[in-house]
Amino acid sequence: MIRRVLEISLHADPLTHGDSGAIGGQQILIRELVKNIQHHGYGVDVLTAQANPLWPEKFSLGHLGQVIRLSQGLHKDQEAEWFGLADQLAEQALDWMKASGRQHHLVHSHYWISGLVAERIHQATGLPWIHSPVKMAEWNQRPGDVLDPTRVEAEHRLLEMPNAVVVSYLTEAEIIHRANPGLPVYVVPPGVDPTQFFSRDAGPVLRTRGLARRPVIYVGRLEAARGLRQALEELATRDLPDDFVLLVLGGTRRQIQQGTPVAEDLAELHQRLGSHVQFVGGMPHRGVAPYLAASAVTIAPNQGPTLGMAVLESMASGVAVVGTRVPGVQDWIEDGQDGYLVSPEAMGELWDKTFELWSDPTEARKMGRRGQDKVHRLHTVGHMAEEMVACYREVTGLGRNQVGIGF
């Protein structure tokens, strides 16, 4: 009999169009998780919210999986309004479960908005429930973040009722353990698809972008907390080699128009840096892979916690990473071995290390190969699926002592 999991991811549709700029690490992680746990005989139904009326209500995701879009939904930034929809979304989810006739063995919610709905399903059905907090607001603030007391209260409550919690890195586990010592915590790191992210010939990208040598690359959103502005401000103070280029991959079509950022501060920095920075914009996730593999170094100047998917994807592509000491960056990089780590305030040091590697391709490749080897040993989508399935079996009673509970 197929064991079936109900994944709830209202805030992050795993089939979000990557070139919209809206896709992030959470969507990628959930999509790869859903696809790969099916190889272990699990059927997966993903409940998400209808963000675009043109998208189908149901869509296949793997041979035993599907995405179901509930009729209600808001923009992902409208978090306060999401709270008011929780009861209505839970009723829709329960109605869909009843109408589908499917027997689910487990509910797994991702992020606090989904947790509110999962909490109600758990109460109504008695199904085992695993919750993934995904960077709780109170403990994972970035500069400029404003705490929403409603969200903080909800996130605390969501640590009281689940059968277990799954987090991406050890720092999260320690924080949750302090909040609720009796709650089982599993650490399941993100995984990268090594058939998509691997070493490639840089030629096609270099010719497309008109580059004389491998560039440095940034992959991520353009929000201030990601550290891109701070990195560009420091870069603009330097006397740069003629052939140095930073590629910036990220941003929506509204944020990047004809290769120029719309935001006034980014546009000013772009003007100062001239041809040394190219804003490529957003693109489908699969389109990122050739750009990463064609780069000499990836920078991750994050000012606060992140899942770090771009870090792991860079390492899988054989590219060294220079990043900040924040959760989701420092967890994957071994300083001095497969990249370098600096404090979030040390943008000068970040560029010093970046230019050190950019100027020494042999050392950069050595670091990149070490990172690639680590990803293949520890952080593929196969590893992630195996560890998550072991968690599922443990929580549902199908397999005892297969995965060590964190604390």
Image: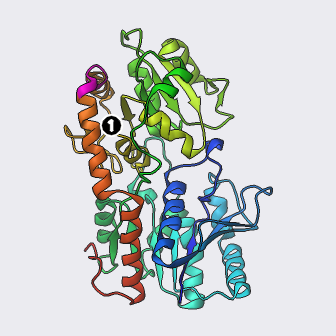
Residue 360 on the magenta segment: yes
Relative to residue 289, is residue 239 drawn left or right? left
What is the quadrant of residue 40 in the picture? bottom left
Tell me if residue 244 comes above or below residue 52 in the rendering.
above
Q: Secondary structure at mark 1?
A: strand
204 on left or right of 284: left
Query: In the rendered structure, which amino acid carries the disc numbered 1?
Result: Val
Figure disc tally: 1
x then y, percent, for residue 321: 33, 37
Q: Residue at x 52, y 88 (%)?
A: 127
> Is residue 137 highlighted in magenta?
no
Above or below — where is 222 with respect to 42?
above
- Judged left or right of residue 360, residue 161 is right
Residue 282, quarter of the rendered image: top right
Which color scheme does this rendered protein use?
rainbow
Residue at point 67% right, 78% down?
93
Q: Which residue is mark 1?
A: 321
Q: Is residue 218 visible?
A: yes
